[in-house]
Image (spheres, rainbow, N blue to C red):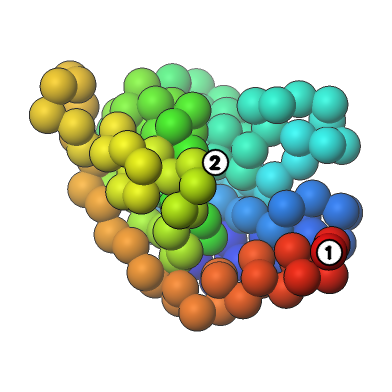
Amino acid sequence: MREAIALARAAEAAGEVPVGAVVELGGQIAGRGANSPIARHDPTAHAEILALREAAARIANYRLENATLYCTLEPCAMCAGALVAARIKRVVFGARDLRFGGVRSKFQIADSDVLNHKAEIVEGVLAVECVELLRGFFERKR
């Protein structure tokens, strides 16, 4: 999670909403992502999607069955769907996203009984630090 926080800080330094994500596989970081939809002109360039893409490319397989995704912010519905498609084993996040959360706050996509794959969900890891990153970012924006 500390690496995800570092990536969130990098996203913030680039003027993006401070969200970072890493995919861990076999005790190693297989993928990293820092939120960058503005810089990439890409609405799908969320930290989680970028981390999934890098990890899948690294192992040459779109299925990341024994992987854990660590993210500073609860994944949105798009990202939660991608986590299911990638067969992520476990999702660990810091702060809830009360407006767009696709894992706990608004929807429970990643461990839904109606889908073919369910990820284990762990929330609140380093939550205070993750919330403060976001709070500070949006306070400075206003």
95 lies above or below 109: below
Name the residue at 45% across, 65% down: 94
User: Which residue is labeled 1 in the image?
Assistant: 142
Give the camera-side residue of 24 and 76: 76
Q: Where residue 106 sits in the image (x, y, percent)?
A: 36, 42
Q: Amino acid at mark 1?
A: Arg
Give the camera-side residue of 33 and 41: 41
7 lies above or below 48: below
Give the camera-side residue of 30 and 49: 49
Name the residue at 47% across, 64% down: 95
Q: Where residue 120 sits in the image (x, y, percent)?
A: 21, 48
23 lies above or below 123: above
Q: Residues within 10 Å of mark 2 (few under 14, many from 20)?
A: many
Left or right for 5, reference 30: right
Name the residue at 45% across, 53% down: 98
Name the residue at 72% across, 73% down: 136
Looking at the rendering, which quadrant does residue 20 occupy?
bottom right
Q: Where residue 21 sits in the image (x, y, percent)?
A: 56, 51
Left or right for 112, reference 87: left
Give me the C-alpha separation between circle 1 and circle 2. 26 Å
Left or right for 3, reference 14: left
Work out which residue is located at the far left of the displayed protein and give it. Answer: 113
Circle 2: element type: helix
Using the image, tell me which numbered label, if any, was put on residue 67: none
Q: Amino acid at mark 2?
A: Glu
Q: Are marks 1 and 2 in contact (CB under 8 Å)?
A: no
32 lies above or below 137: above
Using the image, tell me which numbered label, if any, was put on residue 48: 2
The quadrant the C terminus occupies is bottom right
Q: Where residue 124 sits in the image (x, y, percent)?
A: 37, 69
